[in-house]
Amino acid sequence: MSTHLRVDLDAIRGNIARIRATVAPAGLMLVVKDDAYGHGLGPIVRTAAAAGVEWFGAFDVRTGSAVRAELGSRARIFAWIAASREDLEVAIADELDLGIGDSALLEDLADAARSASTPARVHLKIDTGLHRNGVRPENWPGFVTRAAELEADGTIDVVGVWSHIAEASDADDDDARTIFDWAIAHARRVGLRPSMRHLAASAAAFARPEFRYDMVRVGAFCYGIRSAGGPSATDLGLVPAASLNADVVSVEDDAVTIGIGALDGVPSSLAGLAEVGTPDGARRLMSVDTASRVETWPGAAVGDVVTVYGAGDRGESSATDLAEIIGTIGEEIAVRVSPLVPREYVGG
């Protein structure tokens, strides 16, 4: 196997346990967008469900339906992108919870629920300043009043109120939380009783207890991917679950060539800047093309394995270490790995 992504399911379980202990009594929603951050949706959701996770954040309806197919009725699945009437109908049929942050979409969902004769489970989204959809504060009173009317006639069930925050500064996030608290209070004034309030993602869930409310939506940390510019995975008590590995396919005097490159998801901008793991420790990644060249080591041979990123056991960088070199985030490195690269699961 020339190239593969090795995923340690024991690390996934350990990260989940660490996060749940940290955020308790708030619940954990495991975010599984982008094929579980490139780790493979099916094995990840099955592992998480066996570890006691009940809520899954799917991003879109298609992913939510895939989680439902994997886990059946035992999971609660939250999706916050519905792009069509068909999406709404599928979400209702598959008993997904939908994040709704638009008045027109709320009406479309209500119409679909009436046609299905099944109440739709809804989490209403307030825009707290990030402008990643959501109802503006000046429009919120009318929005929640209408939602209360639809709940009263049995068309929808308002399960939650939610939002995104920027996590750019404590001051900005504090302002967002003030708006969020106001939005919840106003929803209650019009008769809604949302049981799930969720605002925080990975970083805020760890660092800001007051942001946890009833549930936190955590993606990156569950996979051991730390925030760029933030504490190390070790300091957070997390373990990177994935390592991207490639076999040496040829050996030259000063370099070896490994069977992985830009087409498989390794950013070409890392050439000359990153270190990878080898049987003899860290070595410089010299070039990235259809394959990649790595600084050689004593005794290097065809068939040796080089780790492009992982937990650091062989001197390699983490996904976030690589991301910081080129000014992005660890998640971006993880999801770039081609779906054609085989996934190998251990610890299951």
Image (spheres, rainbow, N blue to C red):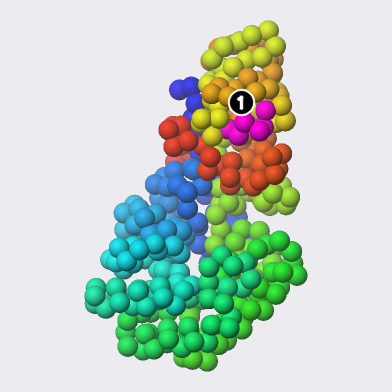
Residue 138 in which image quadrant: bottom right
In this view of the protein, can residue 291 be seen by the observer? yes
Q: Quadrant of the C terminus?
A: top left
The residue lying at 31 percent from left, 58 percent from top is: 72
Q: Nearer the viewer, residue 345 or 84?
A: 84
Left or right of 250? Residue 347 is left
Judge from the rendering whether residue 237 lies leftward or rightward of residue 71; answer left or right. Answer: right
Specify the quadrant that holds the N terminus.
top left
In this view, 201 is above or below 125: above
Residue drawn 39% across and 47% down?
A: 42
Residue 115: percent from left, percent from top:
24, 75
Instruction: Specify the amino acid type for callout 1.
Output: Val
Range of residues picked out in magenta = 266-271
Q: Quadrant of residue 157?
A: bottom left
Question: Which residue is the site of mark 1?
Answer: 288
In reply to whether residue 301 is colored magenta, the answer given is: no
Residue 9 visible in the shown view: no
The answer to whether 37 appears left or right of 231 in the picture is: left
| Residue 252, position as x, y percentages in the image | 64, 9
Q: From this view, report whether residue 242 is shown above or below residue 247.
A: below
Instruction: Residue 222: give x, y in percent of width and height.
Output: 56, 52
Residue ID at (70%, 11%): 254
Q: Residue furthest top?
A: 253
Q: Is residue 281 above or below residue 267?
A: above
Name the spot of residue 114 as percent of width and height, x first: 27, 78
Taking 342 as reference, is 155 above or below it?
Answer: below
